[in-house]
Amino acid sequence: MSNIVLALEGAWQVLVVGILLGAGLPTIFALGIRSLSYGVGGAADIEAHEPHLIGKIMAGFCFAIVIAAVIAGVGAIVASGFGWELGF
């Protein structure tokens, strides 16, 4: 019985990480893109578009989260290739 509990516990952790990284990071990136159009309005001219300062800050924050996650993922892959063990 304990093997089933351990298997389900591991499957639950994989599911949560898969949802966070599989759907969460693209969602954060999309929010960053969307925040660049904050405060423009419906009849905005695309060529003369200047994002609002709050939109720029929010987009930078969203993009920084996505870039940090990508760097952490690449770092984990490289570290495991060298035989190092990472702990978060």
Image (tube, rainbow, N blue to C red):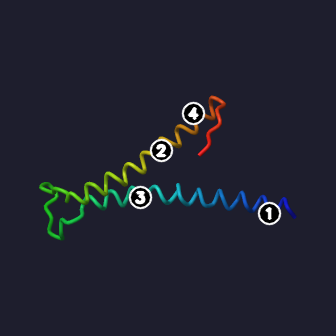
**Residue that label 3 marks:** 28
In the rendered structure, the answer to whether residue 24 lies left or right of residue 34 reads right
In the rendered structure, the answer to whether residue 85 lies left or right of residue 74 reads right
Residue 28, position in %: x, y? 41, 58
**Alpha-carbon span between mark 1 and mark 4:** 32 Å
Q: Earlier in the sequence, mark 3 or mark 4?
A: 3
Q: Earlier in the sequence, mark 3 or mark 1?
A: 1
Number of numbered discs: 4
Residue 53, position in %: x, y? 21, 57
**Residue that label 4 marks:** 78
**Alpha-carbon span between mark 3 and mark 1:** 33 Å
**Residue that label 2 marks:** 70
**Alpha-carbon span between mark 2 and mark 3:** 13 Å
Q: Earlier in the sequence, mark 1 or mark 2?
A: 1
**Alpha-carbon span between mark 1 and mark 2:** 32 Å
In the rendered structure, the answer to whether residue 64 lies left or right of residue 14 reads left
Report the front residue among 83 and 43: 83
**Residue that label 1 marks:** 5
Q: Earlier in the sequence, mark 1 or mark 4?
A: 1
* Residue type marked 4: Val
User: Element at badge 4?
Assistant: helix
* Residue type marked 1: Val
Furthest toward the right, the residue is 1
Using a 10 Å C-alpha cutoff, classify the residue at mark 2 as few (fewer than 14 neighbours), some (14 to 19) or many (20 or more).
Answer: some
